[in-house]
Image (cartoon, grey):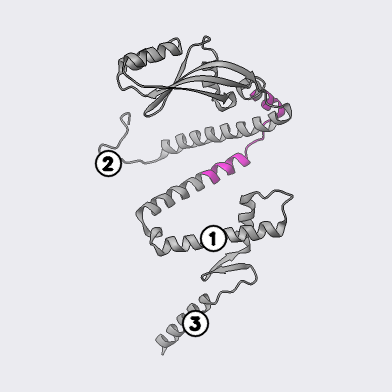
């Protein structure tokens, strides 16, 4: 008798779950899966809808986007993707990143806000992003990164772009020429300072995994950050730097007290 009651209850529960309706806090039901008002509000917040947009239209658009996403997720689950090792690995990584970001945001939100004097000092110490900001026109040579250490040494010591081209030709390495513009605000200050101090016409080389780019500054144009925007930009940059420093400091502290064991062959060389 008891078994019959349990089975009946399970059947009733299953039927109830299949009969979910779009009422109350449930704004839509997609193949039996609810979309709540909270999910819809979060979708609207993520889309950062402009203030002059019709609210009803924005809500309808956001809801349709949610429905589309639910349908694709349901199909992915039907295909078993949510059980695959690759998905589970990426899910774990995404969860880790979210937890770290929320931890750091909590620390930053409770940190002391920089004073106007500190913000002004920060702007003065980063001319590349504020008063001294410029647009650089670059003349470049793009080439496969040489594996020969002798060739690399010659390229790194070149005093002109023509010398770079000559060394590449002598080594039998093909290259292409290009022109581009860069905003100095994109450079870390240490790199900006190093490049800005080069003699006129002397190239600087950026090496990638398999490609290198030798560049020469052909002209500079002032592009100072407007004074009415500088303060907020500086504050954002300061918060980013403080967050990165907080992460480094916290990791250093945690590693000092953590018990970490390595399989033979995986430990760092200086352990």
| Left or right for 120, reference 137 | right
Q: CA distance from mark 3 to mark 1?
A: 30 Å
**Residue under the image location 45 percent in, 80 percent down:** 10
Which span is picked out in magenta?
101-122
Q: Which residue is mark 1?
A: 68
Q: Earlier in the sequence, mark 3 or mark 1?
A: 3
Quarter of the image that includes the C terminus: top left
Quarter of the image that includes the N terminus: bottom left
Q: CA distance from mark 2 to mark 1?
A: 45 Å
The quarter of the picture where residue 142 lies is top left
- Mark 2 vs mark 1: give the one in front: 1
The stretch drawn in magenta includes residue 105: yes
Task: Count residues near mark 3 (Cα–Cα under 10 Å), then give few for <14, some for 14-19, many for 20+.
Answer: few
Q: Residue placed farthest to the left in the image?
A: 264
Q: Which mark is residue 102?
A: none
- Mark 3 vs mark 2: give the one in front: 3
The stretch drawn in magenta includes residue 45: no
Q: CA distance from mark 3 to mark 2?
A: 52 Å
Q: Which residue is mark 2?
A: 263
Instruction: From this view, report whether residue 243 is shown above or below residue 127.
Output: below
- Mark 3 vs mark 1: give the one in front: 1
Residue 130: give x, y in percent of width and height.
65, 24
Q: Which residue is mark 3?
A: 12
| Left or right for 210, reference 251 | left
Residue 98: give x, y in percent of width and height.
51, 47
The residue closer to the viewer here, 110 or 143, is: 143
Look at the numbered disc 2 and give the secondary structure of its residue: loop
Task: Count residues near mark 2 (Cα–Cα under 10 Å), then give few for <14, some for 14-19, many for 20+.
Answer: few
| Left or right for 111, reference 139 | right
Q: Earlier in the sequence, mark 3 or mark 2?
A: 3
Instruction: From this view, report whether residue 200 is shown above or below residue 66.
Output: above
The residue closer to the viewer here, 232 or 132, is: 132
């Amino acid at each position: 008798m008891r078994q019959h009651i349990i089975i009946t209850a399970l059947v009733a529960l299953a039927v109830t779950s299949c009969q979910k309706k779009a009422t109350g806090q449930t704004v839509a039901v997609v193949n039996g899966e609810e979309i709540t008002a909270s999910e819809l509000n979060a979708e609207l917040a993520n889309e950062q809808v402009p203030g002059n947009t019709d609210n009803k239209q924005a809500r309808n658009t956001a809801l349709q986007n949610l429905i589309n996403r639910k349908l694709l997720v349901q199909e992915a689950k039907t295909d078993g993707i949510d059980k695959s090792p690759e998905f589970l690995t990426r899910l774990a990584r995404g969860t880790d990143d979210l937890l770290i970001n929320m931890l750091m945001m909590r620390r930053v939100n409770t940190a002391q806000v920089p004073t106007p004097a500190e913000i002004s000092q920060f702007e003065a110490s980063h001319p590349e992003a504020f008063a001294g900001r410029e647009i650089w026109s670059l003349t470049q040579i793009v080439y496969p990164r040489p594996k020969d250490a002798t060739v690399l040494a010659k390229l790194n010591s070149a005093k002109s772009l023509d010398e770079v081209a000559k060394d590449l030709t002598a080594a039998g390495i093909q290259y292409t020429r290009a022109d581009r513009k860069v905003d100095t605000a994109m450079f870390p200050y240490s790199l900006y300072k190093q490049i800005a101090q080069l003699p006129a016409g002397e190239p600087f080389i950026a090496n990638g995994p398999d490609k290198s780019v030798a560049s020469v500054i052909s002209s500079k144009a002032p592009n100072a950050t407007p004074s009415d925007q500088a303060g907020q930009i500086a504050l954002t940059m300061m918060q980013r730097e403080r967050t990165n420093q907080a992460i480094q400091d916290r990791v250093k502290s945690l590693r000092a007290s953590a018990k970490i064991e390595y399989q033979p062959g995986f430990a760092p060389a200086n352990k």
